[in-house]
Amino acid sequence: MAEELNPFRISQRQLDTAAELMGLDKQAHALLREPERAVIVNIPVRMRDGKTKAFTGFRVLYNSARGPGKGGVRFHPQESLDTVKALSAWMTWKCSLANIPFGGAKGGVICNPKEMNSAELENLSRGYVRALSRFIGPKVDVPAPDVYTNPQIMAWMLDEYETIEGRSSPEAFTGKPVEIGGSEGRFDSTAMGGMYVLRETAKIKKLNLKKAKIAIQGFGNAGKFAFEIATRLAGARVVAISDSQGGVYDPKGLDYGKLSEAKERTGSLEGYKGAEKVTNEELLELDCDVLIPAAIENQITKENADRVRAKIVLELANGPVTPDADRILFERGIADMPDFLVNSGGVIGSYFEWAQDLQGYYWTEGGVYQKLDAIITDSFNTVIKTQAEYRTKGKRITPREAAYVIAVGRVAMAMKARGRY
Ligand code: NAD
């Protein structure tokens, strides 16, 4: 992999930029450039032909100064130690910005889950936990679902963990089915959190959401819930949405029910009647007030950032705006709200699941949303306050830079309090 595209090198460069901006202590900076622990395991898995196959698995605990590790497990053919290290660093900053009592972690297995049957996936999930049981746990490092893993996989992993430990421990994994200690509201908490950030950003930009036109890239878990919540709760109009094959645009507003029906019937959003077809590139440049990238990374770059017409970009996906584009949007007065603030509702939902399991007392969906709103709105306000503080020192920093300064600063303070430097 080219060094400039290596995700771990990218995460280190982002830290370096924040460190310079905030004048971070050199010892803290050096400690934060590398993970605390990276474990590689070789997992034997019995396959459907009766033969054993070896799979490589990873679990990286990036930093534990603020609490146990927290982060998903990905099952992906292109997984590597460097992707897992980078993702564990980003989880550290996300948990810190949300001010929840977790450090950051991530895990993964190099495999192709599309070629594996259910029994093989169960064997792999249980094998992953057997290989790593000493390095995970409710007060050590708490895994969750991520790319190509899901609540069923968490249920198998939890069952294996509890068998090894010989006791009930639902708080050892999050993203579980509700029947075994999962939380209400966990699966739309990412989009719900994003909508709270949008509500606050709209206040600052003096945008009336009830009259706003929204364009969403992506019709998966994040994009679908964002559509529903934006229209149902905020009363906004979603004028465009896309999936990997392209999208549809109607300035009068799209109907969620008809869209889901079209996707189910024809396999494509383009089956929606009465709307204009748009490509994914065109969608980003449409006449709208709010643009929500909710699909994949590197969508708004220095090539197209000048043509974005939205007043607010809400990064629900991870990494949809490149660093160059971030600056261009900022200079053009567009509020680009960073991914690790906007989509932190997911990990905040995981935190609520862990807290409920520890207490053995479960909250209603309404209770979950109320607490989510309080936490994410507080993070938002801290970002805005930090930008204002830097302005008084003569420095104009982007919301992303402000978020990094807060997140890295909190982890550094926790390390200092513990005497790590
Ligand atoms: P998903 O797999 O459910 O959906 C992804 C969507 O993106 C699909 O509709 C797919 O068709 C579309 N897509 C794929 N390639 C595309 C392309 N080239 N152009 C346009 N659309 C394309 O995934 P998700 O869970 O909705 O996650 C989307 C993004 O949000 C990811 O970046 C993910 O990391 C981030 N995110 C999701 C959560 C969550 O709770 N789901 C939490 C945090 C971050």
Image: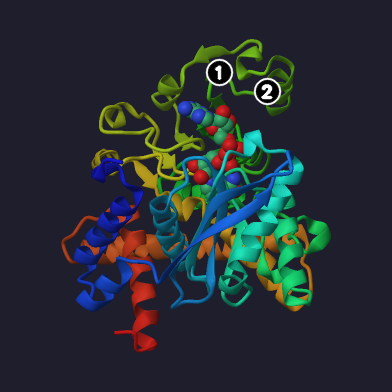
* Left or right: 324 in relation to 222: left
Q: Which residue is mark 2?
A: 259
- Judged from the image, the secondary structure of the residue bearing numbered disc 2 is helix
- Amino acid type, mark 2: Leu
- Coloring applied to the structure: rainbow
- Amino acid type, mark 1: Val
Front residue of this view, candidates 229 and 145? 145
Name which residue lies at 35% across and 33% down.
300
Whether label 1 touches label 2, CB < 8 Å: yes
* Left or right: 35 in relation to 227: left
Front residue of this view, candidates 107 and 345? 107
Find residue 401 and report its horizontal and vertical position in percent.
Answer: 30, 57
| Residue closest to the far right | 179
Q: Quadrant of ligand 1?
A: top right
Q: CA distance from mark 1 to mark 2?
A: 9 Å
Q: Residues within 10 Å of mark 2 (few under 14, many from 20)?
A: many
Q: Which residue is mark 1?
A: 248
Name which residue lies at 50% across and 52% down.
197
**Which numbered disc, 1 or 2, marks the residue that appears first in the sequence?**
1
Find residue 408 and report its horizontal and vertical position in percent.
Answer: 34, 68
> Which of the 4 quarters of the picture holds residue 256?
top right
